[in-house]
């Protein structure tokens, strides 16, 4: 499936809103299973990870196939995926939640970063966690494990629909990550969800300020009509510049 | 990948030996992860399930895609897989070990049986477990669950390498099932493993008889040279008829 | 919350259809989490378990409170629940999925049966599994465990909304159980779901007969217009007597 | 630690009471963790499994040590344990709850049975489950798995304290098994617990009869003074013959 | 159940001792299950979290009830609990250990903090983990998750006994949290446990100093009579000022 | 089993290479299960933890044996292990992966450190995690828990083969830990694996530099002949000084 490039405005909006808010906008559409539960960022990063999913699928390893010599083939699907994931994409690895062996390590992450890929997400584990956390390259994984991927995983194909952390990820879907973790936004909802989330966060910042000032939840969270009127008055000029 | 039809002699041998013995022969080749752990047969069957793997892959469902109307498309991959799995094959479903919704139910099992497919194996669950257990059609699954597959699973492609219960299954691999569960024999090892397993069981039956008669493990299990000589004497004629 | 007695026709319909079909009818309404995953019946029973939920909630035990002497109080909530669950109801126990100690045993099951309660459902375990499986009283549980409930559970209140096996159960909801397990039908949907499920099973039995006869899925499952016409013709008279 | 032989009267009493009742008597002593949770019997047996624990400890396997050739050594700890467990004992295997490979199979079970060992208990799995279930030899395990123990387990020592299914088992402790599963009675409590359990079951049978006849829990379960008086009257003669 | 306000001296003592020491004092009373296993603090805080439990109970969500509009009711139990938890209390949420959706987020935490509630403890997850970790408000949770609570949880009642992380929590119990996690001290033991723990830590600090200086465990840990004499001599004056 | 002291050169090499590289060298020998999955370091440390395994085995606790008074015996196995683990060793605790109670705390860690033991590894949890993380003493554990070890664990013997985090650990094996976690190197492979790993990391550093400079994976990772020639040229002088 080919997609038009993601609207740069959408990318900018998605960079500035929380994964929590995005999840709520998807929930409002009846999508309850969009958050990749159980993954943690290896390092903090100032703004969100935002990019299009480029997927890689692993199946369990077999001892006679998945030997060190397998990597002598530079067209090995894991290596091919790293070389083909386009700039601006996020490489998403389906490890079936198995994390006793690492899905990948420092050299591949370095290559991805050098090629303009913006991050990596896996429901398995990563090795070289120390150096990777210092690279300025957003990586989300289930855990850390030193063991080489060949001992548990066999890369089989890429750029196809996968599951990751129990969530469906289709190529071209938009992944957004912050300190809470990663949400997968189905491509067709990306523009609308980004706009709604930005608007919703404006309102929530306004509410938060009021709650900090002592306002009760009643009337404020969610905002009733009079609170919304106050919000609209205070945000009227701002709205025109967005 | 195309395969020659499985040698009928191999099928016959595999029908008569235990999954335990087959696993040991694979272990002897360094393959430690060939048993599909955690699956149970829905019913007892007199001889082993034996057939070539025809695979089906699910990813997690998405609420806006996986609705009842999805089945109005008769080319839906789940339905297509059921119609295309060849006679003599075993349909193997990769459910990522998720069993809160059923992978399939009675009507599809009936269609498989009618088409000459010899069994179904899934690391998810099945619904209509009562009627299915009476069909004379071997089904192995992780559990029973009534909820429709669309609530958790999205069939995406078939006849590709998959993982099932943590084991790699390539199309054309040979699945064998008995009361212990199911083993996946990589296609290229099938003939040799079948022959070795049959031979090994002859020996083990001989040992078992001796142990029942009071023989100690020492010298008998594993058999030392003199026990093997006794075995060879008693089995010399039998060997020629195999 | 008080409920009118369940319509006897609804009870009859629910007794005759499968939990799988009922789950599908709930799924059609957007309810994906109504099947109490992971519970097994202790014994087979000819027709479905059908009854209204009467709930009991446990919290974890505390060693200084939950001692054998606690049962000297005949108003202990566990005992009170057993005595107050009305005839025709199903006692549903919220054990938080903890099954290292039994939720209850033979004497309480006997009292429930004697009082006209129609079954028991728990996401914990039961003790005295042997005798209970011979009582003709439907019991669904996660597992068997001999240890007394006081070592893990503290009964705290009853006839309130609970969770059981990850599913919300409100007093008065309708529980239906067969070999697949138990579904919880929200009270307000019971009549409609029962009627729809009965109708749907009539159609599915018709389809099943055709599939057994060699019909392909295409055109039959789900039934297209012409198959439905055949069904309607063959069922026209039957429909009038229902 | 050496033990005097178990009192034959104690053995007889333990054969006739339920594991549930025994657990309650241990609970009354403050022992909450004596039931080996999660193990199932491979077959039904008329009376309880009762025997002294003879233990065997496994650690995880290592690929260069745990090869088929390891069994060429007839003093391999697993084989030695099978040959040394005394008649009347129960072989208890500590598999650390790991069940992806079988702890043992038919030939070893046959040898144990032939030597007068009365049963086997493991928190791992067994292979050859079909034939073993027909042997008339009580086996309790977590699951069934065909893979040979060498792929996951390394037998290291025996007749030492172990954990099994989360419960401490010291050599000489008394294991009792029925359909609910297995309880481990610390040796020093065996006589008293057996006597108390027998007495308690007499009372419970009396209560059960009354509950079947329509008696409420109040006054009967637990029995108040007047119920106990009725019990004592009805059991006075019986008591003298026990 | 109404409680007298917690003795301010007790609060002060509990602020200064470790959760480990408190757990040991409860263990000494036979209470083995008082530590809320598996919860982590979102941020470090200089002194312990100490407060009385105010509880909130969730059951699983139902798709037709738990929609965004549910929050339009300002008396929704989750919101009511946030507004009613008294100053000095800790809001404890029973999420049944389910953490795929967040139990709550930044705005509610802000309101709690503003109202004088001293912390929040949940066996589910929280969203907005980044901002919450900067608030100076102690929050303990099982994990981080962005998804809104409505997708998994339904708030049903509050200020009742609950289970949290497998531990019973009664309203008014005292929760204490440090870097190890959170312990629940049954209200009636709070004063005594606080005093004992303070005393015990004085002794342990003394032992620690000796061990740092090279003293062996023998005679020192636990302290024998002569070590206690040394301790008493060195602490005699200090004791009078406590 | 007695071992010669570890070659100091080996120790130095192991201190400087990553656990990931070491795991790969073991994988190349067919050892796939050497990484102690799921353990985290309590604090960062500049160079690797490196030391010989000194083991301690726990079984589940029993309420009548494992009471506070048990520690009055200074020869209690847990205390004895702490006093007998030799300088340069790593104390490795087999907690069967059970982490609801702590395996040990600050005073024992302090004693180990004072005695020259270089670190502690456990597949259970630790208490006093705050102070321990400030001690400059490497500790790896599964989690943090405040509850005293006696409530869950009974120390039974030491300096014997154990399992830890699913990996076999024999006394004298070499444990190496970095930010990814801990690998167990069988003693007999230590010298060779250390040398190979050092060499391999030299090559990988060279590759990493090239990838950072824009080189593709093809030809570089793994290095083909011409890349190796470039490496050999650039490292020729360096090699002579190692």
Image (tube, coloured by chain):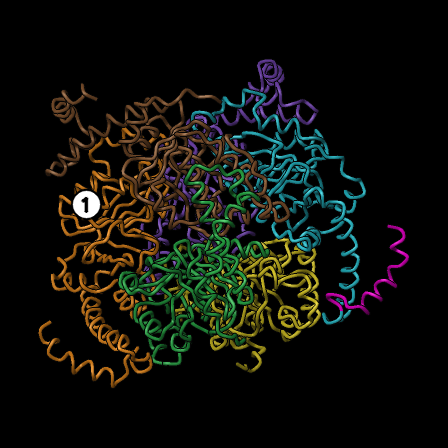
Chain colours: A yellow, B green, C orange, D brown, E purple, F cyan
Residue E49 shows in this picture? no
Q: Start and end of the magenta stretch? A: F220-242
Outermost residue, bottom side:
C226
Residue drawn at (22%, 70%), measured in percent from left and top?
A: C201
Q: Is residue A70 above or below residue F85?
A: below
SS assignment for the magenta stretch, majority: helix
Location of residue D242 in the rendering, given as x and y in whole percent from the top left corner: 21, 22
Residue drawn at (54%, 30%), measured in percent from left and top?
A: F155
- Label 1 lies in what chain? C
**Quadrant of residue B121 in the image?**
bottom left
Location of residue B83 in the rendering, given as x and y in whole percent from the top left corner: 38, 77
| Magenta-span inclusion, residue F234 | yes
Location of residue B120 in the rendering, given as x and y in whole percent from the top left corner: 39, 66
Instruction: Looking at the picture, tell me which residue is in the foreground, E3 or B43.
Output: B43
Location of residue E100 in the rendering, given as x and y in whole percent from the top left corner: 44, 57
| Magenta-span inclusion, residue B99 | no
Q: Secondary structure at mark 1?
A: loop
Instruction: Looking at the picture, tell me which residue is in the foreground, F44 or C38.
Output: C38
> Residue under circle 1?
C135
Left or right of F158? Residue D110 is left
**Quadrant of residue C237 in the image?**
bottom left
Residue drawn at (46%, 58%), measured in percent from left and top?
A: B36
Is the residue marked by circle 1 packed among few (<14), some (14-19), or many (20+) residues within 10 Å?
some
Left or right of C186? Residue D175 is right
Q: Is residue C103 above or below residue A150?
A: above
């Amino acid at each position: 499936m080919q997609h038009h490039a993601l609207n740069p405005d959408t990318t900018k909006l998605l960079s500035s809103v929380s994964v929590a808010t995005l999840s709520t906008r998807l929930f409002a559409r009846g999508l309850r299973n969009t958050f990749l539960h159980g993954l943690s960022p290896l390092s903090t990063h100032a703004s969100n990870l935002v990019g299009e999913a480029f997927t890689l699928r692993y199946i369990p390893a077999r001892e006679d196939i998945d030997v060190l010599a397998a990597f002598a083939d530079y067209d090995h699907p894991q290596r091919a995926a790293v070389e083909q994931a386009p700039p601006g994409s996020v490489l998403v690895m389906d490890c079936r939640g198995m994390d006793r062996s690492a899905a990948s390590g420092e050299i591949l992450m370095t290559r991805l970063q050098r090629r303009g890929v913006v991050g990596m997400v896996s429901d398995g584990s990563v090795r070289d966690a120390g150096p990777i956390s210092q690279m300025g390259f957003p990586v989300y994984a289930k855990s850390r494990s030193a063991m080489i991927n060949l001992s548990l995983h066999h890369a089989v194909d890429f750029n196809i629909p996968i599951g990751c952390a129990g969530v469906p990820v289709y190529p071209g879907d938009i992944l957004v990550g912050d300190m809470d973790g990663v949400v997968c936004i189905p491509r067709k909802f990306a523009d609308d969800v980004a706009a709604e989330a930005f608007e919703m966060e404006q309102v929530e910042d306004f509410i938060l300020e009021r709650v900090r000032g002592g306002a009760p939840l009643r009337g404020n969270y969610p905002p009733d009509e009079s609170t919304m009127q106050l919000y609209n008055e205070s945000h009227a000029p701002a709205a025109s510049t967005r």
